[in-house]
Image (cartoon, rainbow, N blue to C red):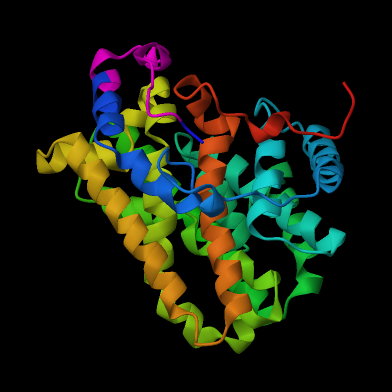
Amino acid sequence: MLANDRSTPGLSRIENEEYRALVERVLDAGCLRKLLRVIGTEPSAPADLRYEPQVDLASIDREVATIQAEMDARGFIGKGRMVRTLVYMRALMVPTDNPALGLAISRLWVLGTYCDDISEYEPENSLCLLKCGLNVKQPPSLLADYCDLAFSEVAPFCDPGFLALFKFYFYQGFVGTLFEAEQHRTGTQHISNGSEYIRVMNGFCEFWFITLQFSDPCLAFSENKLFWLEIMDAIIIFVQTVNDVLSVYKEAVSEVDFANSILYKRSMKRQAPFVEVTQQAADDGLAAYEFILAAAPPGAERMRSLLENYMKGYIYFHMSCERYGWKDVFPELTYFEDASVQVG
């Protein structure tokens, strides 16, 4: 549980004074507290509402070792503990008793995040990935080959139709990163009308959420197409807005990421206070959360519980992983990357 008292020195890593003041206002306005109530870590929340993650640390360690070795062999380095972060995220949000399936999904989640990180300011990486996804001839690429491998490993666990859809949602993200890099190159990110389109395209929202179809037959895409259609808009809103709100500290530390973030772009474009834009994003995310849960048919308790676990896990993930840095602000947090059954 996070304390109400939060020391200002916790924001000292934000060197830009303007950005530090904006994040301070967001925290004081309670934008985070709204989301934290969902997982029961807001100070006034009853203990029985607290989200308790259920993961197998030994299985996570095995997946991390496999994926890290694959990436190291291909020269994909410099990402810190990203592999552990994403493997834990998958285990938290898309549970499965099948080790091969878990590894296959985790590999794709790690790869998607890695590719997003290296593409947002490097258009040649976006183009390489788009050519790979759409089978356009290009020079040999370790990155493209690894994407092909990752999808071949998940293919046995779904029908060809869903595999095609899954690949589409993966690769469409690089349309967004391609345009995002161009905005950054030209310095038009705060005046361009294309920022909202970029955010929809580069969020990987459908890809992240529809992975849940692997968890249980009750969510299988082939049998529930209309259900997935019904919640698709809400999926995009939930995944985007929660990430946007819970990324404000990480992005402010980076500075360049804050200047290019959708919340800051909206604030600048609309001439609206950053705290109001962030508050609206939090409200939109919570409304999407409620809509998705309400969309589960009457009596579909298994479906509803998996949807609820996914969304609560998503919020928990952002607050409890090293990538977003919230321990700087709330020292009582423990990063899950530090949890391992490995010795040393």
Q: Which residues are magenta?
A: 3-20
* Looking at the image, residue 163 lies above or below residue 126: below
Q: Is residue 191 visible?
A: no
Q: Is residue 253 visible?
A: yes
* Looking at the image, residue 234 lies above or below residue 140: below
Question: Seen in the image, is 271 located left or right of residue 77?
Answer: left
* Looking at the image, residue 153 lies above or below residue 178: below
Q: Position of residue 37 (x, y in %)?
A: 41, 49
Q: Position of residue 292 (x, y in %)?
A: 43, 71
Question: Seen in the image, is 303 located left or right of residue 259?
Answer: right
Farthest residue to the right: give it.
343
How many numbered callouts? Answer: 0
Question: Seen in the image, is 263 located left or right of residue 51?
Answer: left
Q: Residue at x 50, y 86 (%)?
A: 297
Between residue 52 and residue 174, name the one nearer to us: 52
Using the rendered view, name the quadrant where residue 95 is placed.
bottom right
112 part of magenta stretch: no
4 part of magenta stretch: yes
Q: Position of residue 170 (x, y in %)?
A: 57, 59
Between residue 116 and residue 267, name the one nearer to us: 267
Farthest residue to the left: give it.
271
Q: Residue at x 42, y 16 (%)?
A: 10
Using the rendered view, name the quadrant where residue 321 is placed.
top right
Quadrant containing the C terminus in the rendered view: top right
